[in-house]
Structure formats: structure tokens, C-alpha cells
């Protein structure tokens, strides 16, 4: 029985140098990455107050005011009670107190001024406005933005208000 042994030829010398360069680079790769990332880490450590990460977009606080029910049909001479609802959502702020003057056209309102003296955030009922309808037609009861007074709140605040529509028959 004959045995044949095949001996591979030596690889060219150029290949050996290439492998040495690749292995040397693999050994130094963590050092290169650290050198690339280290300036960013130093930046984040030295200036944390100027950089803020928040899951929500930063915007001015919003206060929304509306009446419930929003649309009412009533006969002449009858009274309607409208609740004044406010919604203020903020993670860190509250509204300490609020005073509102109600404006109406063509109807008589009782309790034209609502003064809510408790701090709040979220949705709250500020008060009830009683409306006496004396004239036929479409009438709106609204909260003018210039007639809203909020005490001890110095942050930027956007205020939105929705009127109540009353149809008097």
C-alpha cells in the first residue's frame, strides 16, 4: 500500500504581513473606540445642566376652559345651569387660584364671576353659571381671555376657551 502525503506550499510572504496587521488592528480596536467615544463622555459629564433629556416635547403649559353642556336648547324664561370646567396638565406645575368673568349676549347670567381659590392640575369643575334665557335666538356664553386672572403663576401659559351655544325657542 502506498501512502501519498501532500504538503501545502508555503503561503507567500505578503500574506503573513497582512495577517499580522489584521491581528494587530483587532487587538487595538477597543483602544480606538475608546479614543473616539471618550470626548463625548467628557462633554456629557462636564455640562449636565445645559443638556436635558425629556420623553415629552417641551412646550408652554396649557389651560383649557369650557362649559358643560356645550350646546343647549331651552324655552324662553327657563334657567339653565352650565358647569365651567378647566383642564391644566403639567408634570411639575399647578395653578394656585383662578378668577373668571363670564360674558353673555342677550341673556341674563347669575354668578357672572367664578373665583376658584384651590390649587389644581388636571380637570376640575370651577363652578356653575346659571343662565336665564329671555330672548329667542342663538346665544353664546363665553369666557373672554382678558377676563381670566390667575394668581401667583409666572410661567408662560397658553389659555384656550370654548363658548357654550344656547338656542332659545
Image: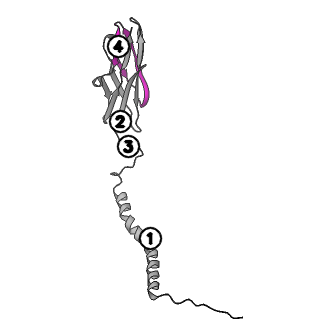
- The residue depicted at 40 percent of the width and 36 percent of the height is 90
**CA–CA distance in space, label 1 to label 4:** 75 Å
Q: What residue would you read off at disc 3?
A: 57
Kindly identify which numbered label has been placed on residue 61: 2
User: Which residue, as the protein is rendered here, is positioned at the far left?
Assistant: 146
Q: Marks 3 and 2, how far apart in space?
A: 11 Å
Q: Which quarter of the figure has residue 88?
A: top left
Residue at the farthest right position: 1
Residue at x 27% of width, y 24% of height: 146
Label 1 close to label 2 by CB (< 8 Å): no
Picture layout, residue 23 above or below residue 84: below
The first of marks 3 and 4 along the sequence is 3
Question: Label 4 belongs to which residue?
Answer: 138
Q: Nearer the viewer, mark 1 or mark 4?
A: 4
3D distance between C-alphas at marks 3 and 4: 40 Å
Q: In this view, does 50 lie above or below 111?
A: below
Q: Mark 1 points at which residue?
A: 30
- Measure the C-alpha gap from mark 1 to mark 2: 46 Å
What is the x, y in percent for residue 131? 38, 12
Q: Is mark 3 on a helix, strand or loop?
A: loop
Which of the marked residues, 1 or 4, is nearer the chain's N terminus?
Answer: 1
Q: Give the range drawn in magenta.
A: 112-141
- Front residue of 116 and 145: 145
Which mark's residue is nearer the viewer, 3 or 4? 4
Label 2, secondary structure: give it: strand
Cβ–Cβ below 8 Å for labels 4 and 2?
A: no
Magenta region includes residue 71: no
Q: Is the magenta stretch mostly helix, strand or loop?
A: strand
Amino acid at each position: 500500500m502506498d501512502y501519498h502525503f501532500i504538503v501545502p506550499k508555503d503561503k507567500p510572504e505578503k500574506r503573513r504581513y497582512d495577517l499580522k496587521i489584521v491581528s494587530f488592528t483587532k487587538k487595538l480596536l477597543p483602544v480606538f473606540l475608546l479614543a473616539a467615544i471618550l470626548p463625548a463622555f467628557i462633554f456629557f459629564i462636564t455640562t449636565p445642566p445645559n443638556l436635558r433629556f425629556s420623553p415629552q416635547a417641551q412646550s408652554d403649559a396649557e389651560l383649557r376652559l369650557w362649559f358643560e353642556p356645550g350646546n343647549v336648547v331651552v324655552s324662553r324664561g327657563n334657567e339653565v345651569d352650565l358647569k365651567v370646567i378647566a383642564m391644566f396638565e403639567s408634570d411639575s406645575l399647578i395653578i394656585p387660584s383662578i378668577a373668571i368673568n363670564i360674558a353673555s349676549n342677550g341673556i341674563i347670567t347669575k354668578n357672572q364671576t367664578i373665583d376658584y381659590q384651590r390649587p389644581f392640575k388636571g380637570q376640575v369643575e370651577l363652578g356653575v353659571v346659571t343662565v336665564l334665557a329671555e330672548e329667542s335666538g342663538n346665544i353664546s356664553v363665553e369666557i373672554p381671555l382678558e377676563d381670566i386672572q390667575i394668581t401667583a403663576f409666572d410661567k408662560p401659559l397658553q389659555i384656550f376657551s370654548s363658548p357654550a351655544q344656547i338656542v332659545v325657542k
